Image (spheres, rainbow, N blue to C red):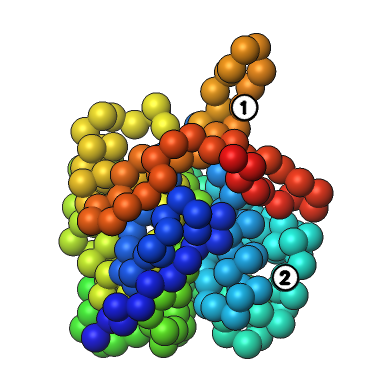
Amino acid sequence: MVSSERFSVPLLAKLIPDGVRPGTILLVEFDPESQWFTVATTIIARWLQEGHYAGYVAFARPPEDIIRDLSALGVDVPAAVKSGRLLLGDWYSATLTGGRLDSAKPEASLFEPIPSGFRVRSLKVADLSVVWLKTAKEGPQPHDVDTTWPAGSLFVGESLSVLLRFNEEKAYMEYAETRVLPEDRRFGRIMLYGIVRGIHSEWLYKRMEAACDGVIDIRVIEQEGVAKDLLRVRSLRGQPRDATWHTIEIRGKGEAVLTN
C-alpha cells in the first residue's frame, strides 16, 4: 500500500504548502529557452541532500551534464549512485542515432547498464512496450532498481518532447496512460515530467494535463523590456497551491531559487 505521507518538494514547498502525496504526477510545461533544466537539477540535488531517493531521466542532455550540474550543487554523485539513492537514465544517446542504438550482442537488453544507472537503446514506444510486458509477466528487470525504493521517491523526466520526436502522439499517449503513469502511481513515485510548450498538438497537451495531477508552467516573459524567468503552479487537484508567478533566479554554481 502506498504511504499517505506528504512530501515537500524542494523549490516548490512554499507554492504547495501541504506537500504532495506519493504517486503524484506533475506535468511541467516549459518554454524551450527557459530555466527548467536548472530548476530540475536543483530540485534533485536538494532532494538527495535531504536523504531521499531520486531518479533523473536525461532525455535532452548526456548524463555527464547532469552529473556535472549535481556535483556543482554539492552532491557526491558517485556516493549517491553507489548507495543506491540516485539513478540516472540515459535516454539521450539514442536520440543521436535515429531513436535506436545498436548492440554487438543480438540478445542485449533494451536497457544497458552504465556506471550511473542505465542506457536505453530504443525510444520507440513499440520496443518499450515489449519490455514493459516482459516486466509485467516476469517481474522487475535488472534496470528496475527503483522498484525497491520507498514510496515518495522523486523522479524528473527531463523532456517528453524528445520521446515524441520518435513516436506518433496517439501511440505515445496510449503507452503513457496504460503503462507508464499507472506504474508511477503504483510504486508511489513523485514525478515531474517536462514537455516543451508550443510544439505539439493541443490535443496532446490536454490529454497529458488530464492524465496528471497538476501542471507547472516555466516561462520566459518580457516585462518592461526585460526577459524574466518565471514559474507557477497552474493547477493541482484536491489541495491548495500558490498559483501566482514567481521569479526564478539563478545563483552561483547553477542553483535555481524562487525570489518572490
The residue type indicated by label 1 comes to Lys
Camera sees residue 235: yes
Q: Which x, y percent locates residue 151? A: 38, 80
Front in this rendered view, residue 89 or 219? 219
Q: Name the N-terminal-most of marks 1 and 2.
A: 2
Q: Quadrant of residue 130?
A: bottom left
Instruction: Read off the residue under disc 1.
Output: 228
Front in this rendered view, residue 59 or 258? 258
**Label 2 environment density (alpha carbons within 10 Å; few <14, some 14–19, many ≥20):** some
The residue type indicated by label 2 comes to Val
Q: Which x, y percent locates residue 180? A: 29, 63
Camera sees residue 189: no
Q: Which x, y percent locates residue 108? A: 46, 75
Image quarter in which the N terminus is found: bottom left
Q: Residue furthest right?
A: 252
Taking the spot 63% from the left edge, 22% from the top edge, the residue there is 227
Q: Quadrant of residue 107?
A: bottom left
Whether 106 is drawn above or below 169: the answer is below
Whether 151 is drawn above or below 63: the answer is below
Image quarter in which the C terminus is found: top right
Q: Which mark is residue 116?
A: none
**Label 1 environment density (alpha carbons within 10 Å; few <14, some 14–19, many ≥20):** some
Q: For the residue labelled by badge 2, is the local secondary structure a helix, a strand or a loop?
A: loop
Whether 140 is drawn above or below 210: the answer is below
Q: Which x, y percent locates residue 237? A: 25, 53
Q: Which mark is residue 75?
A: 2
Taking the spot 23% from the left edge, 56% from the top edge, the residue there is 238
